[in-house]
Amino acid sequence: MNMTVEVPTLSGTHASLPQDPEHFLQSNAKAVFVLLLAVWLCCHPWFGFWHDGMLYLGQALHRANPSHFAGDPFFMYGSQDNYTLFTGFYAQLIKVIGLASAGRYLMLLAHVAWFSAFYMFCRVATRSYLATMAACLTAVALPPFYGGIGIFSYAEPFLTARSAAEPLVLLALALLVQGRQLPALVALVAALPLHPLVAFSGLTVWFAHVVAFPQTRRIRWIVLALAVIGLAAALGLAFAHVKPFDSLLLTYNPTWWLFVSNFNGQVLISLWTQGDLVRLGSLMALYLASTRIVTDQGARRLLACLMGVTVLSLAVSLILGDWLHNIFILSIQIWRILSPVQALMPGLLVGLLISRREHIAGNLQAAIVLALLALLMQDHMYSVLLLISGTLLIFSKPLKIRPALQPYLAVGLCLAILLALLNEALKMSSFVLNHFYSTSYHLLYPHLVSVGIATLVVAVGLRLRSANSVIVMALVCLLCAVVTWDRRSDSETFFENTQGQNPFEKIVRPDESIYWNTFRPMPWMVFNRSSYVNGMQASAILFNENFAHEYAMRFNLVESKYLDKKCTPYLFGTGQCEDGPTNLTPDLCAFDDRLRWIVSEFKNPAVPVTATWNFTVENVPGHMYLYDCVALRKLSPEQQPQTGQEKK
């Protein structure tokens, strides 16, 4: 007797849905994708221009008006802007719709593209809708950081050229899982002019995949021959002193290396912390577990190539970069292959663990849980013990646990993971409150809230057996995510929209430099002018020796005017030392004639103020003051304010 079962579709208003989660998610795949996208956007809001996003904004503004930044050390000796097309497009868009709207819309588009590519990878790698959903929620809930000192992360919440290139790399990896090597190469070539370093990481994985698993032997030898030719060409360009290949034969001198170690230590693997290394070890342990869990041949091949390239990249970076101080190797940061590894590996393993738990041995399940706990507790002393225990379980014989104890063990492991996730969510929320204290919708940021909502929506859909309920709730969630996605503070919104409308721009000539005591180069965004020095500009020390010396000179001289018991070097470097009567003096202008203007929220009545900017914005002082260094240098000794030490 043959029986036909009708599978409900999205259009089925009153169709009954099966209770099996896999069938349910498959029947509502589009609605669930919308729901997951809403969760992703809710947890990756727009806070404005910060972190490296400020640097790329500056590069776009410099591309549009190079003469305005002639006195800025960040652009004096060239910049990484020369190797990407992204900032050119960014600059044109800023001219059309303004910098605030350009950054916001491009960031939203980048997040949608990144999540779509991630979703596609999980679908083709797991071939399970349940595993895909679990992987996506895992990517939301787990910390996204990789590399050194927790600075770098996948799907960064600020706009850079990486935001445009990373989705194309994820797309290429998904195509490689399917064995589609040529379309994958097309995606990587498209990423190359956007961010060469991100694309290079993907190309190394593609190269390993083609060599290890060629569609024909002829292709393997062609690719190997092209690689040899490319390497020979790079060496030839190096000997011909063609930038940036000339740095292949150069090493950092002691002084420059000291600057790199002090200001760019996050790129040196030898300086990574215990937490960084535990995070790396957790990824390795999860990969080892995947070799015994992943059954799809395409996924197994891709993961093998991805982890092989990762290990090789780390070794090359450590030996040639950290130990031998090679400029080219350290500059290209090939360890950034960790970005897709950090994004894909935990989610993929959690997805498979949930969707195929009946077919996974108990020791492997425990190993995955312990590796995840180590990842979440990376900065705690017990994380190393968790990591070692999890790794040993991967190679142990299947554990025999009494049936009566199995539920208690499962509940205990789940509670441990939940507590670790709660701790991570609180840390992320604390970070937002500390750095974006006046932002909107504080309570919407904790990742676990969004993950819980998504899980609840699916559970309600299963309970009601209604496709329409899932569609409606998914659309409502997406609407809420879009409405609350822009969480800039009032002050951030204000400063983003004051370029060309503030009184100081009429006074400061385009070729003059401004010192504004903040970590971010605020003169770029607010005045479209050069920033004399700030903490964020230090990121370029790695790439250019002349800039390294220029920046260190400016930074150290300005820092010397601020350091005291309340202002430590760390606080000054991160822009947390306030202006006051002891530092906002003619001495601040005395050491360099190229410094023309100072902008500050502090008014020193002992020195002349050139102009005052009055405004009313919540949580922001209502006044900014412009000081002219030329006028301050002309003050006679009797007119100059005395410092606390001189009075004593």
Image (cartoon, rainbow, N blue to C red):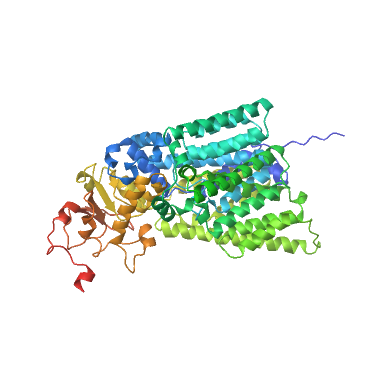
Point out residue 34 in the picture as x, y percentages from the top left corner: 57, 42
Tally of numbered tags: 0
Taking depth in this image into account, of 467 and 364 the one nearest to the observer is 364
Taking depth in this image into account, of 79 and 523 the one nearest to the observer is 79
In the displayed structure image, the side of residue 253 where residue 560 appears, left or right: left
Q: Identify which residue is drawn at 55% across, 52% down.
A: 450
Point out residue 62 in the picture as x, y percentages from the top left corner: 33, 39
In the displayed structure image, the side of residue 568 where residue 8 appears, left or right: right
Point out residue 247 in the picture as x, y percentages from the top left corner: 44, 40
Residue 66 lies in what quarter of the image? top left
Q: Identify which residue is drawn at 31% across, 42% down.
A: 76
Answer yes or no: is residue 459 visible.
no
In the displayed structure image, the side of residue 5 where residue 83 appears, left or right: left
Residue 16 lies in what quarter of the image? top right
- The N terminus lies in which quarter of the figure? top right
Residue pushed farthest right?
1
Q: Is residue 97 above or below residue 483?
A: above
Residue pushed farthest bottom?
648
Q: Identify which residue is drawn at 70% across, 62% down.
A: 411
Q: Identify which residue is drawn at 50% across, 30% down.
A: 233
Answer yes or no: is residue 541 visible.
yes
Point out residue 596 in the picture as x, y percentages from the top left corner: 21, 50
- The C terminus lies in which quarter of the figure? bottom left
Taking depth in this image into account, of 414 and 232 the one nearest to the observer is 232
